[in-house]
C-alpha cells in the first residue's frame, strides 16, 4: 500500500488497538505496540497479583488485590491479609475513604447469634454516591437474601446506570462498574473487592488500609495501635452506644474439642490452592469456632471462606464432599427454591442477561459470571443454586429452568446464549453439543469490517463499535489521466498547466478543494514593440 501521498516518510499512526503503522520508503509497514516488561510484585495478603491493562488493552502491569473478608464469630481478614477476631455487637465501618473521592463506604452490623456464638454478622450496608444498598438474610422456612436500594426492596436481578445486583440463591453480589467494586454477602459472611489502582492507600476502617503493608492495618481514627480488637471497636458508627468487647486474652481457655474437620484445609483436598493462598488464618478461625461451640459444623464457614479465597485466586476446590456430610450441599438446600441443584465445582451455566452483558463460562470450576466493565471481563465465581444439567434459567429475572437453546424456541428478546460470546462476533445456536455439559454450542464468526478507503480517506476505529469508518484527511484532485492527493493548505498545479492551481482548505471536519485559474488579458498589437529593419539584419 502506497502512503507517500498521505503521510511523510517515517510518520507513524495507530492502525488498530495494538498495531502501529509506519510509512517507510512509500510503503506502509505494520508492527505490534511495544509494551514495557511488567515488573513482578509480592502481595502482603498472599493473593496472586492481577494484570491491569491499559485502556487500549495492549499492555499491562501487575497490581495487588484489595480483598477483605468477614465470617463466623466474627473473624476478619483485612485488605493486606491481617487476621483478627472481634466480638463487638454494634454497627461498624468496614471501609471508609481517607478523603472523599467516590462517595463509597461499607458498614457492617453485628448482633447476638441464635446459636452459641456471641455475635454474628447480620447485615451490611454499602453507600455509593446517592445510593444506600442494604443486604441481609431473612429466614422463614426458606432462607432468602433481601436487598434494599434506598430503602426499597429490589428483585434478585437489578440494575441501573450505577449499580448491578444479582444472587445465586445463597450469595448476593453487588457490582459497581465505575469503581470496579464487588461486594458479596451471605449468611454470616461478606467479602469486599476493590481495585488497588483506585483505592490503594485510600481505605480505612475494620478492613484496614489497602497499601500492601500489614504494619498499618490496625489504625483507629488518627492513631495506630497494635491491637486490632481495639481498632475494630473504635470504628463503630456512633449511632448507638457500643460497649467494647472483653479482651480476648482475659477470656477462659477454650476446651479441647475435636477439630479434625479443620485439618481438611491442610490436606490434599486444598493442595492446588496451598501455593496460591495461605490457609493459616482460616484454620485458626475454624479451630476457634469448633472449640467454642463444640460443634464440628461450625468449622464449615471457615472452610467455605478459604475455598472462596482460593476461587478468587483462580483455584476451585470441591471441598464439601471431604467433610463426611458435615458441610455437605444438603446443608444448603434450604436456600434453594425451585432451582434445587447446588454446584461447587461442576460445569454449569448460571444465567445470561442480555442487558447486564453477563457471559457464562464453562470451566472446571464454579459457574462463572463475567460482567463487562470498560471493555474488561471481570470474573465472579460463586457457589450457588443452579439449574440441572441441560437446562438454564429462562432469564436473569426468573427462577424457572428451561431447556437450553436449540431444544426450544424462545422469543428473540429472550434468546439464551449457551456459550461464551464476545463483542464483534455474529453467533447462531447450533445443534452441536458440548461433550461435557451437553449444552448447545454457538457457531461464531467475526463481524467483517471493510477497511478499504478511497484516496484522501483513512480508516479509523470508533470507540464502542466493532467497525470503524473512513474519515477524510486530505483533498483529492481528479483530472483526466492523473489523480493528486492534496495535503491541507497545499497549493498544486497540474504538470504543463501553470495557469490552474488547486488548494486544500479544511472547514470543520471537511476538506474542500478550491480551484483558481489565472486569466490572461486580451491580446492588443499596440502593446507589442515594433521590430525595426535594423534588428532584422
Image (cartoon, rainbow, N blue to C red):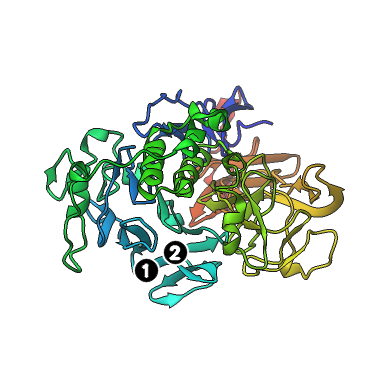
Report which residue position mark 2 lands on.
162
Q: Is residue 124 left or right of residue 349?
A: left
Instruction: Residue 467: tell me if it is visible.
Output: no
Q: Mark 2: which secondary structure? A: loop
Q: Say which label, 2 or 1, has the lower sequence index.
A: 1
- Where's the C terminus, which quadrant? top right
> At which x and y percent is residue 57?
53, 39
Task: Tell me the CA gap for discs 2 and 1.
Answer: 9 Å
The residue positioned 30% from the left and 60% from the top of the image is 103
* Tag of residue 472: none
Graded by Cα atoms within 10 Å as few (under 14), some (14 to 19) or many (20 or more), the crowding at tag 2 reads: some
Instruction: Residue 204: tell me if it is visible.
Output: yes
For the residues bearing labels 2 and 1, Cβ distance under 8 angstroms: yes
The residue positioned 78% from the left and 59% from the top of the image is 404
Report which residue position mark 1 lands on.
131
Q: Nearer the viewer, residue 493 or 428?
A: 428
Q: Identify the image quadrant of residue 134.
A: bottom left
Q: Mark 1: which secondary structure? A: strand
> At which x and y percent is residue 253?
26, 40
Q: Nearer the viewer, residue 205 or 271?
A: 271
Q: Is residue 95 left or right of residue 310?
A: left
Q: Nearer the viewer, residue 387 or 533?
A: 387
* Disc nearest the viewer among 2 and 1: 1
Instruction: Report the number of numbered marks.
Output: 2
Graded by Cα atoms within 10 Å as few (under 14), some (14 to 19) or many (20 or more), the crowding at tag 1 reads: some
- The single residue placed furthest to the bottom in the displayed view is 152
> At which x and y percent is residue 100?
24, 56
> At which x and y percent is residue 241?
16, 66
- Where's the N terminus, which quadrant? top right
Q: Is residue 3 above or below residue 321?
A: above
Q: Is residue 387 left or right of residue 507?
A: right
Amino acid at each position: 500500500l502506497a502512503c507517500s501521498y498521505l503521510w511523510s516518510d517515517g510518520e507513524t499512526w495507530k492502525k488498530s488497538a495494538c498495531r502501529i503503522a509506519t510509512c517507510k520508503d512509500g510503503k506502509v509497514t505494520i508492527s505490534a505496540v511495544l509494551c514495557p516488561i511488567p515488573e513482578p510484585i509480592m502481595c502482603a495478603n498472599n493473593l496472586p497479583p492481577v494484570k491491569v491493562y491499559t485502556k487500549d488493552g495492549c499492555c499491562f502491569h501487575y497490581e495487588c488485590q484489595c480483598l477483605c473478608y468477614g465470617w463466623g464469630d466474627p473473624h476478619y481478614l483485612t485488605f493486606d491479609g491481617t487476621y483478627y477476631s472481634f466480638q463487638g455487637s454494634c454497627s461498624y465501618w468496614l471501609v471508609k475513604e481517607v478523603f472523599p473521592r467516590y462517595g463509597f463506604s461499607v458498614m457492617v452490623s453485628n448482633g447476638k447469634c441464635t446459636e452459641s456464638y456471641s455475635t454474628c454478622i447480620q447485615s451490611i450496608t454499602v453507600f455509593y454516591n446517592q445510593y444506600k444498598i442494604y443486604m441481609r438474610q431473612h429466614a422463614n422456612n426458606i432462607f432468602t437474601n433481601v436487598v434494599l436500594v434506598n430503602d426499597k426492596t429490589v428483585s434478585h436481578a437489578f440494575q441501573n446506570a450505577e449499580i448491578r445486583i444479582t444472587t445465586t440463591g445463597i450469595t448476593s453480589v453487588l457490582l459497581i462498574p465505575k469503581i470496579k467494586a464487588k461486594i458479596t454477602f451471605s449468611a454470616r459472611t461478606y467479602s469486599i473487592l476493590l481495585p488497588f489502582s483506585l483505592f490503594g492507600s485510600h481505605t480505612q476502617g475494620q478492613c484496614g488500609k489497602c497499601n500492601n503493608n500489614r504494619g498499618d492495618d490496625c489504625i483507629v481514627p488518627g492513631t495506630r495501635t497494635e491491637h486490632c480488637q481495639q481498632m475494630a471497636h473504635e470504628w463503630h458508627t456512633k449511632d448507638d452506644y457500643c460497649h467494647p468487647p472483653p479482651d480476648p486474652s482475659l477470656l477462659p481457655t477454650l476446651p479441647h474439642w475435636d477439630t479434625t474437620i479443620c485439618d481438611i484445609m491442610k490436606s490434599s483436598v486444598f493442595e492446588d490452592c496451598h501455593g496460591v493462598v495461605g490457609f493459616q488464618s482460616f484454620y485458626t478461625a475454624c479451630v476457634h469456632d469448633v472449640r467454642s461451640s463444640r460443634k464440628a459444623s461450625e468449622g464449615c464457614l471457615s472452610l467455605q471462606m478459604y475455598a472462596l479465597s482460593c476461587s478468587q485466586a483462580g483455584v476451585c476446590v470441591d471441598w464439601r464432599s471431604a467433610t463426611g456430610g458435615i458441610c455437605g450441599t444438603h446443608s444448603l438446600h434450604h436456600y434453594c427454591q425451585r432451582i434445587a441443584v447446588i454446584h461447587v465445582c461442576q460445569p454449569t451455566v448460571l444465567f445470561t442477561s442480555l442487558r447486564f452483558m453477563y457471559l457464562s463460562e464453562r470451566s472446571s470450576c464454579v459457574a462463572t459470571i463475567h460482567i463487562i466493565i470498560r471493555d474488561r471481563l471481570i470474573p465472579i465465581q460463586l457457589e450457588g443454586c443452579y439449574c440441572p444439567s441441560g437446562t438454564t434459567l429462562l432469564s436473569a429475572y426468573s427462577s424457572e429452568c428451561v431447556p437450553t437453546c436449540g431444544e426450544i424456541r424462545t422469543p428473540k428478546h429472550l434468546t439464551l446464549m449457551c456459550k461464551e460470546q464476545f463483542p464483534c462476533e455474529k453467533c447462531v445456536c447450533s445443534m452441536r453439543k458440548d461433550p461435557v455439559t451437553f449444552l448447545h454450542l454457538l457457531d461464531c464468526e467475526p463481524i467483517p469490517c471493510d477497511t478499504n478507503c478511497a484516496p484522501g480517506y483513512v480508516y479509523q476505529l470508533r470507540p464502542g463499535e466493532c467497525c470503524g469508518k473512513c474519515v477524510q484527511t486530505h483533498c483529492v484532485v481528479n483530472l483526466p489521466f492523473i489523480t493528486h492527493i492534496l495535503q491541507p493548505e497545499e497549493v498544486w498545479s497540474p504538470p504543463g498547466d501553470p495557469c490552474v492551481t488547486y488548494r486544500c482548505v479544511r472547514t470543520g471536519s471537511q476538506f474542500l478543494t478550491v480551484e483558481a485559474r489565472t486569466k490572461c488579458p486580451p491580446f492588443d498589437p499596440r502593446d507589442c514593440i515594433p521590430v525595426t529593419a535594423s534588428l532584422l539584419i
